[in-house]
Image: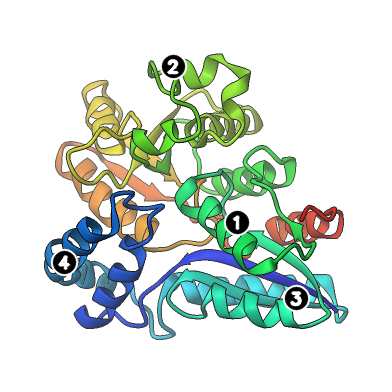
């Protein structure tokens, strides 16, 4: 049996503040998210951040929660089902969340005990320490040298570019401006890979060496390829979800929206190519918060374009990529 583990960040079990608090605590205690010594991280996360943020975050989750549950989990289950159908009976597809349930650690531990051929599949198009890096760290810790197939970041794979562009084409009109909004990261996380990284706002576009494990460079490459596929001139890239006072990669989505309004842009479509399945960051942060900002400040139309989710093009591309993977560990 060939077993596929679809990996995503995770979701609270409900939108109740206590459940959101449990999720935030597990998420923020990861040293790949907040990289300060453990005693200070304990105090910061458990004593300061979570007791306050769990209530505001719970309200955000409540806005997007469905009758079936968390949009991320519901969407992941649908993706899992369609991929299972595409791959056939000789494959088994499972979901593993890095935070919350179903637990990636538990799914991986059970899989490694079997004789199954394992396909480790982080659903993150671009590489980041906090996502792909954390998942690979867990795999290395648990696998003990067992060889598995690993899906590499697919930020420039034709099947991903085409499936993302197909979603955008369905809603994009000639007069629309297209914003490609990616999840942001602190600059300090980029510099973990290369101290000289991010010297200027355009350095990610200049050096071919930056593309390896550089999240921002990979996002910019995704945008470049999507724009080429769309043949649409009015496209700009930005980064969302900025938190705290530290320096984050730029430009921010909020600042870009203000700039576009000043330039006279009144019709805006937004896609989020760093996400495969729609979640809090796309549905609430972009589809509600950024939309409100744009419309209240003079915009006339704003539309969030769904992620690739379980689209046929994405399922077929991912399925074919899995079939062609080579043993890497």
Can you give x and y, in whole percent of width and height, for residue 278 in the image? 46, 61
| Residue 76: quadrant of the picture | bottom right
Q: Nearer the viewer, mark 3 or mark 1?
A: 1
Q: Nearer the viewer, mark 4 or mark 1?
A: 1
Seen from the viewer's position, the closer of residues 137 and 120 is 137
Report the residue at 66% width, 77% height from top.
94
Q: Are marks 4 and 3 in contact (CB under 8 Å)?
A: no
Report which residue position mark 1 lands on.
136
Mark earlier in primary sequence (3, 2): 3
Seen from the viewer's position, the closer of residues 108 and 54 is 108
Q: Are marks 4 and 1 in contact (CB under 8 Å)?
A: no
Q: Considering the numbered disc 3 on the image, is that residue within a helix, a strand or a loop? A: helix
Can you give x and y, in whole percent of width and height, for residue 246 in the image? 22, 36
Q: Nearer the viewer, mark 3 or mark 2?
A: 2
Report the residue at 71% width, 79% height from top.
111
Report which residue position mark 3 lands on.
84
Report the residue at 57% width, 16% height from top.
207
Q: Tell me, what colour scheme is on the image?
A: rainbow
Report the residue at 80% width, 70% height from top.
86
Mark earlier in primary sequence (3, 1): 3
Q: Considering the numbered disc 4 on the image, is that residue within a helix, a strand or a loop? A: helix
Mark earlier in primary sequence (1, 2): 1
Q: Are marks 3 and 1 in contact (CB under 8 Å)?
A: no
Q: Residue furthest bottom?
A: 67
Mark 2 burial class by Cα count in 10 Å: few <14, some 14-19, many 20+: few
Mark 1 burial class by Cα count in 10 Å: few <14, some 14-19, many 20+: some
Report which residue position mark 4 lands on.
56
Report which residue position mark 2 lands on.
202
Name above or below for residue 141 compared with residue 23. Answer: above
Seen from the viewer's position, the closer of residues 63 and 12 is 12
Mark earlier in primary sequence (4, 1): 4
Residue 311 visible in the snapshot: no
């Amino acid at each position: 049996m060939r077993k596929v583990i679809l990996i995503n960040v995770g979701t609270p079990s409900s939108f109740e503040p206590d459940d959101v608090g449990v999720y935030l605590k597990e998420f923020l205690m990861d040293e790949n998210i907040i990289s300060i010594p453990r005693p200070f991280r304990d105090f910061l996360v458990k004593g300061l951040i979570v007791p306050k943020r769990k209530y505001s975050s719970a309200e955000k989750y409540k806005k997007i929660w469905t009758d079936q549950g968390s949009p991320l989990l519901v969407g992941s289950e649908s993706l899992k089902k369609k991929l299972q159908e595409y791959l056939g009976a000789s494959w088994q597809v499972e979901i593993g969340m890095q935070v919350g349930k179903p637990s990636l650690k538990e799914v991986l531990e059970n899989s490694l005990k079997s004789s199954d051929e394992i396909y480790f599949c982080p659903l993150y198009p671009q590489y980041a320490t906090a996502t792909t890096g954390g998942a690979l760290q867990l795999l290395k810790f648990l696998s003990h040298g067992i060889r598995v197939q690993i899906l590499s970041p697919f930020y420039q794979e034709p099947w991903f570019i085409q499936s993302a562009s197909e979603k955008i084409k369905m809603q994009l009109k000639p007069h629309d401006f297209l914003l490609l909004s990616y999840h942001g990261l602190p600059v300090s996380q980029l510099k973990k890979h290369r101290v000289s990284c991010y010297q200027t706002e355009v350095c990610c576009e200049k050096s071919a060496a930056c593309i390896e494990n550089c999240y921002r460079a990979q996002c910019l490459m995704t945008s470049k390829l999507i724009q080429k596929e769309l043949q649409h001139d009015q496209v700009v890239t930005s980064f969302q979800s900025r938190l705290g006072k530290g320096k984050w990669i730029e430009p921010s989505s909020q600042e870009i929206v203000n700039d576009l309004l000043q330039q006279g842009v009144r019709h805006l479509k937004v896609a989020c190519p760093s996400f495969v399945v729609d979640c809090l960051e796309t549905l609430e942060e972009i589809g509600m918060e950024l939309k409100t900002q744009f419309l209240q400040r003079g915009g006339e139309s704003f539309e969030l374009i769904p992620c690739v989710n379980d689209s046929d093009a994405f399922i077929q591309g991912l399925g074919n990529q899995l079939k062609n993977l080579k043993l890497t560990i």
